[in-house]
Amino acid sequence: MRPLALLFAALLIAACGSQPAAPETTRTEAPPVAEASFSKEVLPIFSQSCMPCHSGGADAKSKYVLTGYEGVMGTGKDSVANVFAGKADSSTLYQMLQAGKMPPAGPLDPAKVELVKKWVVQGAKNN
């Protein structure tokens, strides 16, 4: 009986030792969200789509000038701020783009509207 007990013990040890180790759980953080650039990404959208009416020139149809950061952040003829840093849903600029009301030639590509939203939500920085 002794050999049988040794065999049983050896099998028990082998079975316990052959179990795969539980994987280590590591805490992973979400990758950082890239910051939207006003000068490289947002301003070109306005330059391509909004300049006939928002250039500030003599023929411009609107007093809301989108040719630079100060104009975008400033107020239009309605004397209401058009961009509230960090608050896209409160920003007239985003509301008009998101609703498809601007530009009058037709709504912007949704990806461009989302980029403007991202820029506003990230603080509407002059970067």
Image (cartoon, rainbow, N blue to C red):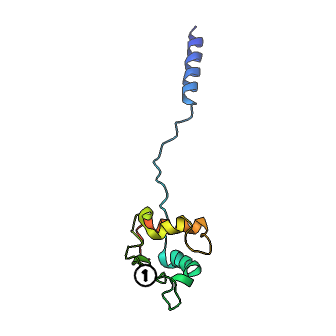
Q: Is residue 4 left or right of residue 87?
A: right
Q: How many marks?
A: 1
Q: Quadrant of residue 123?
A: bottom left
Residue 96 position (above or below residue 64): above
User: 89 or 125, which is in the foreground?
Assistant: 89
Q: Residue type at mark 1?
A: Gly
Residue 77 position (above or below residue 94): below
The residue at 50%/90% (across/down) is 57
Looking at the image, the residue that sits furthest to the bottom is: 58
Specify whether residue 35 is in view. Answer: no
User: 31 or 2, which is in the foreground?
Assistant: 31
Looking at the image, the residue that sits furthest to the top is: 1
Specify whether residue 110 is in view. Answer: yes
User: 15 or 101, which is in the foreground?
Assistant: 101
The residue at 57%/74% (across/down) is 103
Percent from the top left, x then y, of residue 91? 43, 67
Q: Is residue 68 left or right of residue 102?
A: left
The residue at 40%/81% (across/down) is 70
Q: Is residue 60 left or right of residue 78?
A: right
Q: Which residue is mark 1?
A: 71
Secondary structure type for disc 1: helix
Percent from the top left, x then y, of residue 35? 47, 68
Percent from the top left, x then y, of residue 36? 49, 70
User: 34 or 42, which is in the foreground?
Assistant: 42
Quadrant of the frame with the N terminus: top right
Residue 3 position (above or below residue 107): above
Q: Residues within 10 Å of mark 1 (few under 14, many from 20)?
A: some
Percent from the top left, x then y, of residue 10? 57, 21
